[in-house]
Image (cartoon, helix red, strand yellow):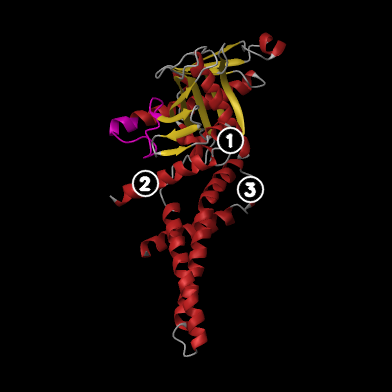
Amino acid sequence: MAKMDERLEKMVERYREINDLMMQSDVVSDRKTMAKLGREQNELTPIVETYEEYKKAVEELEEAKVLSKEEDKEIREMAQMELEELEPKIQNYLDRLELLLVPKDPNDSHNAILEIRGAAGGDEGNIFAGDLFRMYSKYAEAKGWRTEVIEMEDSEAGGFSLVSFKVNGEGAYGTLKFESGSHRVQRVPKTESQGRIQTSTATVLCYPELDEEDFDIDMNDLEIETMRASGAGGQHVNKTDSAVRIVHKPTGIVVKCQDGRSQHENRATALATIAARVKEEHQRELDEKAGAERRTKIGTGDRAEKIRTYNYPQNRVTDHRIGYSVNQLDRIIDGRLEDLMNALQLADQQAKLAGEQL
């Protein structure tokens, strides 16, 4: 406990230092520094607040112990009641602090970029990709986050063969990173005349948006071309070379962006996206070489890993990594993901704690 207290005191000291820095005029005028300090402050706030509550409860416990030895019977009884109330309260604070001190991914506070692709099942896989896109969009809206489409390839039967989009919001990546993998749907497709249940899949890849200072990509490795945007959008789309396509030649990763208002905006978005995508691919290769699990102990995060099944006939959603199963598919596909996301984050924290104790 002494070691934990020492670590927590350093965090309190850093928290106060950040608060002082964010009051200085030269820092306030520096947008990047303010954003960086703001993220660090947000990460430290729940730890510092819980630690202060814990210390207050410990002080009250010590006072109650002294009073429990008083000669006055009534005072002793009141003190004993306080002890019985404070001891489990303190243990609860310790449990919360233990979870809060689990090492966090430094990218957790970042915006998230998601790519959804229709996979097995042909048209039905693409339709399901569209369902997932709407599910995440509704969830983001409920969280007060903002979504921006980066690339969208419509499917003739509905849905998308590919849709990539950015989710802007504090902690978006930390919440959505568990969505990477293969999502399986079991239902009767609209095109199925015999009423037979079909299994189809869509894949999701989630990675963090990088800060500008984290861009580490050689421009000589990029092939950049402009073209006319395709799809809905009227005369503006058809008459301007506003779409931007970037290929990272060493990896073959391709990003296309056409939903911005100008070629300049699409180029900036495409560059930021490909930088994040290349970094993600590099991290995946490093993890594979090291034989380590990627990003989280509740799953590899690989696009091919089967992570969840959406069973429409039984109105059931099952997350195979943590054994989470609920008969609330209608709620989940409508974007009400809070309980599922909380279960995934808790399982990740517990897995990390168990790993540290081995």
* Residues at marks 1 and 3, CA–CA distance in whole angstroms: 32 Å
Residue 238, given in percent of the width and then of the height, sits at 67, 9
Residue 214, given in percent of the width and then of the height, sits at 48, 34
Give the mark nearest the N terminus, 1 or 2: 1
Please provide the residue range marked out in magenta.
286-306
- Tell me the mark number nearer the camera, choosing from 1 and 2: 1
- Tell which residue pokes out farthest to the bottom in this image: 71
> Which quarter shows the N terminus?
bottom left
Circle 3 packing at 10 Å, graded few (<14), some (14-19), many (20+), is some
Circle 1 packing at 10 Å, graded few (<14), some (14-19), many (20+), is some
Give the mark nearest the N terminus, 3 or 2: 3
Give the mark nearest the N terminus, 1 or 3: 3
* Residues at marks 3 and 2, CA–CA distance in whole angstroms: 36 Å
Q: Is residue 25 left or right of residue 216?
A: right
Residue 195, given in percent of the width and then of the height, sits at 50, 16
Residue at x 52%, y 54% (from the top left corner):
46
210 or 351, nearer to the observer: 351
Q: Compared with residue 130, is residue 355 higher up or lower down, i.e. above or below?
A: below
* Dot label at residue 139: 1
| Three-letter amino acid code at the position of disc 3 | Val
Which residue was labeled with disc 3? Answer: 28
| Three-letter amino acid code at the position of disc 2 | Lys
